[in-house]
Amino acid sequence: MYERELQTALEAAQRAGQELKSRYQHFQKIADAPADISTDADRASQEIILSLVRSAFPEDALCAEEQTATLAGAKQTGPRLWIVDPIDGTRGFARKNGEFSVMVAFVEEGRIALGVVLEPAFNRLTYAVRGGGCWRRDGAEPDATRCRVSAVADLASAALIQSHSREPGTRSRWVEALKPAQVIESYSAGIKLARLARGEADLYLNTYENFHDWDICAGHILVEEAGGKVTGLKGQVLRYGQEGAWQRDGLLGTNGLVHEAAVAAIAQLVR
């Protein structure tokens, strides 16, 4: 099921990734790149992805971060919806630390059907189809390997992956509430969710009050198909394809085993 959609998503991500790797090699580093930075590379990547998707599925709706020609000429909502972040973690791209990803997801009737997260700088690919598991292929590996979340069952032993701290060396109130054994940081939500699905971290917290579908959709299904759990900060079901593509409930992704404990730990901090 969704074989044609998956092949389209994989091809689109790989083509965009090749373009980004080429641009990345020649990109002039911006050491103080802000959180909301957008580059020509973002727009080029998005056009590559959306053009290929629209060619394969001309009637499908498109939801993406950048204002580009293909997006402007397509339906924005519908029962079949592609959700794309052409560069997730543009600060990682601009600061040239490799922490950026290409995210392509397909949603049917409000349910995520598949997700692809490609990390061009690290040659890491993680993808999943609903009911078909989560898979990884790194570097020149010819075959994909199935991903499973970690087996850590205690928050005190868990590794939390989060965005880079604005105050390095100072733990946020969220980290203080969770008290994990380790904190890992990355600019890209796609990378965070992929690492969670691969068992390289045990939980991920996104506490932004407002973000968008493209920030998390592709990574969401990776975690669930790898055996984990993804909800809002209070345990809410996350929905995609609604007006404005807004997400306002935050995100908590875990290996499933520490999910209830994490929800309880941060309960006093959630509005």
Image (cartoon, rainbow, N blue to C red):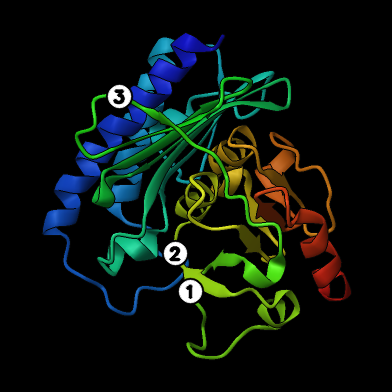
Q: For the N terminus, give its image quadrant.
A: top right
Question: Is disc 1 placed on a helix, strand or loop?
Answer: loop
What kind of residue is marked 1? His
**Residue 46's quadrant in the figure?**
top left
Q: For the C terminus, give its image quadrant.
A: bottom right
> In the figure, is residue 182 to the left or right of 209?
left
Quick one: label 1, few (<14), some, or many (20+) residues within 10 Å? few
Q: Are marks 2 and 3 in contact (CB under 8 Å)?
A: no
Quick one: label 3, few (<14), some, or many (20+) residues within 10 Å? few
Question: Is disc 3 placed on a helix, strand or loop?
Answer: loop
Q: Can you give x and y, in whole percent of width and height, for residue 182 in the image?
A: 54, 74
At x 41%, y 11%, the residue is 56
Question: Is disc 2 placed on a helix, strand or loop?
Answer: loop
Q: CA distance from mark 2 to mark 3?
A: 28 Å
Identify the mark nearer the N-term, 3 or 1. Answer: 3
Q: Which residue is mark 3?
A: 143
Q: Can you give x and y, in whole percent of width and height, for residue 198 in the image?
A: 48, 45
Identify the mark nearer the N-term, 1 or 2. Answer: 1
Q: Which residue is mark 1?
A: 164
Q: Can you give x and y, in whole percent of width and height, for residue 191 in the image?
A: 45, 52
**Residue 240's quadrant in the figure?**
top right
At x 61%, y 32%, the residue is 225
> In the figure, is residue 133 to the left or right of 51?
right
Disc ID at residue 187: 2
Q: Are marks 1 and 2 in contact (CB under 8 Å)?
A: yes
Q: CA distance from mark 1 to mark 2?
A: 6 Å
Query: Which residue is more in the foreground, 104 or 204?
Result: 204
Q: Is residue 267 placed above or below 89 in the rendered structure?
A: below
Identify the mark nearer the N-term, 2 or 3. Answer: 3
At x 47%, y 69%, the residue is 185
